[in-house]
Image (cartoon, rainbow, N blue to C red):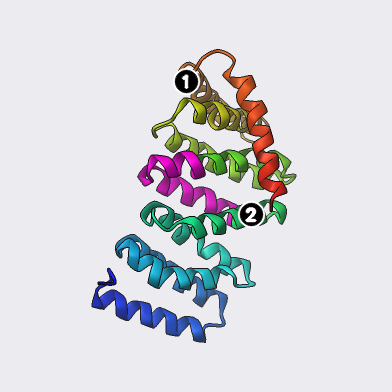
Amino acid sequence: SSGINAEYGVLVDVLTSALREATNPHTKGTIAAIAKGLCDNAEPAAVVSHVLPIMTHLSNDPDVFVQTSTVPAFAVMLQRCTGSIGGVREQMDRFISEAVSSDIHPMMCAIIESFTMVLPLCTPDIQRDFLIPRLATIGVSNSTIVNKTKRRDITERLINAYKAILCSYLTPDTIEHYIVPGLQALSADAQEVIPEKQQTVDLMLREIISKTAGGTQHRGGTAFGSKVSGFFKKK
């Protein structure tokens, strides 16, 4: 069995046909949104075999709007297609790198919102090894944004992301190397661009530090700094 019923099979065929004919970016964005619905409901094997090729094609579209429209579907694949997510991780890494290096604000917002949506539903290893480290990387890079409105948008979304993170299972290493330095960076951003939210961030930071041994802040910041540098150097 392909893991996809007749109704979904017809919809995939329609989407594939529409994709061949589509030239308007908003039409392509609609195709991505419908395909994301398939990711939510079809069996993981069917998502990989039938939906992933559609999303991969759209993710390589020259229009940034179309690329951004694929982010939610790729995030759902991280959650549901746990046995076949290598290519999905690589795609999300490419999105993050491009959003940072080219200052693609809508894409970065979509990445954070999508990660926040799927994080509580993902397996602990995907949370620990991918989602949390990437959100921490985004948080550190946020301080380089010159436009304060954009920086505020990212900061607000990261606060929601960390609320979801703190409800997840966290290992001491994850707390030390990603959560604490990520929250420290978020606190500094909040102080500058959204001071009314800094207290919320600092409360989260104090709560997580209270669960770890003394000295975590310093060691975590040092280790994480090298990881962030390495992430962007390899792109």
Regarding residue 37, the answer to whether it shows in the image is no
- Residue at 47 percent across and 38 percent down: it is 128
Q: Position of residue 182 (x, y in %)?
A: 58, 33
Q: Secondary structure at mark 1?
A: helix
Quadrant location of the N terminus in the rendered image: bottom left
Packing grade of label 1 (10 A; few <14, some 14-19, many >=20) is: few
Verify CB contact (< 8 Å) between mark 1 and mark 2: no
**Label for residue 3?**
none
Q: Secondary structure at mark 2?
A: helix
Circle 2 residue: 105
Most common SS among magenta residues: helix
Residue occupying the far top of the picture: 214
Q: Does residue 178 appear in the picture of this structure?
A: yes
Real-space Cα distance between discs 1 and 2? 30 Å
Task: Give the residue at mark 1.
Answer: 207
Task: Identify the residue at image location x=61%, y=43%.
Answer: 138
Q: Quadrant of residue 192?
A: top right
- Determine which quarter of the picture holds residue 47: bottom left
Residue 31 at x, y percent in the picture:
45, 74
How far from the left and from the top, in percent, is residue 170? 43, 30
Left or right: 30 as drawn, with respect to 44: right
Nearest to viewer (mark 1 / mark 2): 1
**Relative to 60, is 132 on the left or the right?**
left
Residue range of the region highlighted in magenta in the rendering: 106-131
Residue pictured at 49% horizontal, 35% vertical: 162
Vertical side of 40 occupied by 232: above or below: above
User: Going by the image, does 188 lie left or right of 37?
Assistant: right
216 over 91 or under it: above or below:
above
Amino acid type at circle 1 is: Glu
- Which of pointers 1 and 2 lies earlier in the amino acid sequence? 2
Left/right of residue 224 with respect to residue 16 in the rendered view = right
Residues packed near mark 2 inside 10 Å, few (<14), some (14 to 19) or many (20 plus): some
